Structures are given as C-alpha cells and as structure tokens.
Image (tube, rainbow, N blue to C red):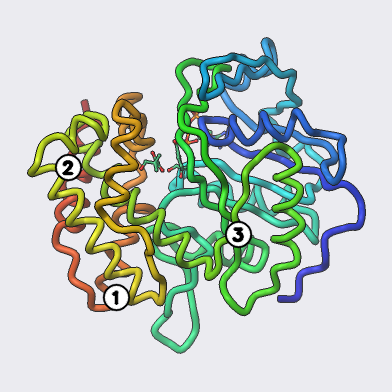
Amino acid sequence: MTLPPLPDRPLDICVYGIGAIGGVIGAHLTRAAGTGDIGRVTLVARGAQFAALRDHGLRLRHPDGEVETLNVTVTDRPEDLPPQDVVITALKGHQIPPLAGTLASLLAPHGRILPVVNGVPWWYPLPDGQGGTKGADEVDPGGVLWSTIGRDRAIGTIAYLGASTPEPGLISYDISGYLDLGRLEGEDRSDVTRIAALLESSGWLIRQTRPFVDALWTKMMSNCSLNAVSAITRTPNGTNLAAKPLYDFTAAIMEEVRAIATAEGATIEMSTEKRLALALRNPAFKTSTLQDLEKGRPLEIEPIFAAAAAVGHARGVPCPMLDLAVEILRHVDRAHQSA
Ligand SMILES: NC(=O)C1=CN([C@@H]2O[C@H](COP(=O)(O)OP(=O)(O)OC[C@H]3O[C@@H](n4cnc5c(N)ncnc54)[C@H](OP(=O)(O)O)[C@@H]3O)[C@@H](O)[C@H]2O)C=CC1
Ligand SMILES: CC(C)(CO)C(=O)C(=O)O
C-alpha cells in the first residue's frame, strides 16, 4: 500500500449519508468532536433529512428509548467541504457508485474511506480472470469506485447493530451493537488501529476481527438470509422464524452462504441455529431491506444478495435457495417500483 500516512493531528471526519446507520455514527462522532484524535465532524445529508438536521438538530433515540438532541454540522453541498482525513459512507450499496467522483474529491490525498455497507463491499477483491483482481460487478458496475477512489483507501467496516429513521431528524438506534473494522490479511493495519481507537473514544464498541473476511462473511450470512426473507414476506424476523418453512428457508440460505464463505477462505464460527436464536431476541425488528421496501425505496438486491450469489457461482458453490431469493426479490422490487 502506497498511501501517505494519516496526519499527526486530530482527524477531520465526514459522515456521508445520514440515514439509520450514518445517523447513529454521526451522532456519536459529533458528541466527541474536538476531543482527543477527533477533529471537525461534518455530516452530509440531503432533502428533508438535511433540512430537519439543520433546523432542529439530530435526535438520537437510544436503545433504552431515551431521546438525545445534538446540534450537528451538516451540509447538503459536499463539494464545498475542505478535504477530509476520513470519510465514512453510510449509504446503500447502490447509492455509492454514482458518488465516486464526489467521494474521491472529498478525500485528502492521505484520506481514508470507511464504507459501512451490507453485502459484498466495493473494495473486496475478486479474481478478474486475468491473474489480477477486481470488484464485484453487482456492487461496482464498470469498476468506477475501484478506479476512482482505489481500494487501498478503503478500510472494511461492518455494522453489527440495528437502526431506523422513523421521521426526518429522528434516528432510532434500535439494537445496540458494534462496528467491526479491518483490512485483508497482509495489508497494513496501522490506519485501522488508529481509526478504531478514534471511534472507540466516541463511545463505540469496536471489534477488529481477524481475519477480517470472517467478519465480512459472518455478516453476509445474516443479511442474505434474514433480510431477504423479511423483504419477501414483508414481516419482521420474529414472525418469519415462527413459521417452520420460513425458518428452514432462512437457515438454508445461511448454510449456502457459509459454503460460499468457506470457498472464499473465511470461517463463520457462529452456527445457523445460534444466529437464528439471536435474531429472535428482537422479533419485531425490521431488517434494513424491509425498511426500504416499506418506504418505497429500491432494495439493495445487487450489492447484497446477487453479489453473494455471484461469488458462489464463480467459486462453483451451489446456492439454489439464495438464487431463488434473488429472483423473488427482483420481482418484488420491480413490482414495487412500478406501483
Ligand atoms: N439499518 C440497519 O439496521 C442496518 C443497515 N446496514 C447497512 O448500512 C448501509 C446504510 O443503511 P441505512 O443506514 O439503513 O440506510 P438509510 O437509507 O437509512 O440511509 C442512507 C442515507 O443516505 C442518504 N443518501 C443517499 N444518497 C445520498 C446522496 N447522494 N447525498 C446525500 N445523502 C444521500 C439517504 O438519503 P435519502 O433518504 O434521501 O435516500 C439516507 O438518508 C446499508 O448498506 C445497509 O444495508 C447495516 C447494518 C444494519
Ligand atoms: C440488523 C441486521 C443484521 C438484520 O439482518 C442488518 O444488518 C440489517 O437489517 O440490514
């Protein structure tokens, strides 16, 4: 990796996309702005969310129900911001490629990007068939992020938590959790260590699972199954898992993703039964895919489900249940978008 090191001063941070996850991360960082290693913290939002945050601050509903109001520095004009040391994107997978140029311009030459995203991340290297690597086409069509931003700048970031946006300006932190940060084995991790410490100082629980592919595919196991089934049925995990055929469908996808993970050199330690039992602890939680469906938004089908299936196909791992879920979701999404 030939990136210049991060500067030896507090780091300016921009959180790009203030929805559920960006709202929770942005709130924590804003509270800690100007302390320790955290410099200025700026949020990038748009539309009604931008107006509400600017005019009334960010209201964070904690998992215990308490609501905290924070004054935030927010803009809807990222092009006006000075170069940032760290950019955290909390966008849907399909919302990132169109922002490749904006994100590249926003980053200082030494800037790092933390894409908090479910699914196969755009920086995840897959064989290009010519002895090199490339990103997943389903995630980064045409390799625009790969070539414009560059995968070296990206620090893998996985959100193990549940959040939602009930109304503009209100971020609901529904299921408390942690962020898992990492790079692939063999890559320089000094920036990971520093940014992990910085996030921890803002009140986050941070893990740095090694090898990081284990964390990545463990999360993928949940998303490909729980998120898919909830969007197909339009009901939360608790309702789905109470019906044996849906429990079995969810579990079958989990096992397929486990096999794909193994082919990718990753180990998913958690058993399918344990993961499903964990989901049942929050039976009413609506996955982010179900939240999108209910809000009439496009679903993250290609970056999460189709990309995972594509990795399976490329590795020769059969994943018929995941394929079925992808096809049903594409139909659901098409019907929904044309309604
Ligand atoms: N919600 C959850 O519990 C979890 C989500 N995740 C993952 O985290 C990622 C983020 O998800 P989540 O927070 O739920 O998504 P949200 O849709 O809640 O948030 C995305 C935000 O980015 C905004 N945005 C999109 N494009 C732009 C743009 N060009 N300029 C400014 N703002 C923009 C959206 O605005 P607008 O509303 O106008 O589109 C929205 O506010 C996803 O990959 C998701 O799968 C991971 C773990 C849990
Ligand atoms: C909370 C969880 C793990 C559910 O699968 C998730 O990541 C999501 O809703 O996107």
Mark yes or no: residue 338 visible: no
Horizontally, is 231 left or right of 159 in the view? left
- Vertical side of 311 occupied by 172: above or below: above
For disc 1, the marked residue is: 314
Q: State the separation of the CA atoms marked 2 and 1.
A: 24 Å
Q: Quadrant of the C terminus?
A: top left
Please tell me which of labels 1 and 3 falls first in the chain: 3
Split into 4 quadrants, where in the image is the N terminus? bottom right
Q: What separation in Å lies between label 1 and label 3 (alpha carbons)? A: 28 Å
> Within 8 Å: ligand 1 and the Cβ of disc 3?
no
Which numbered disc flags the more N-terminal residue, 2 or 1? 1
Q: Is residue 27 visible?
A: yes
Q: Nearer the viewer, mark 2 or mark 1?
A: 1
Q: Quadrant of residue 120?
A: bottom left
User: Residue 213 vs residue 264: left or right?
Assistant: right
Determine the secondary structure under disc 3.
loop
Q: Amino acid at mark 3?
A: Gln
Amino acid type of disc 1?
Ala
Q: Residue at x 53, y 64 (%)?
A: 123
Q: What is the C-alpha distance between the residues marked 2 and 3?
A: 37 Å
Q: Which residue is under mark 2?
A: 331
Which picture quadrant has residue 263? bottom left
Who's the residue at 31% across and 33% down the image?
290
Residue located at (62% from left, 44% from top): 205
Question: Camera-side residue: 309 or 225?
Answer: 225
Q: Nearer the viewer, mark 2 or mark 3?
A: 3
- The residue that disc 3 covers is 208
Tag 2: amino acid: His
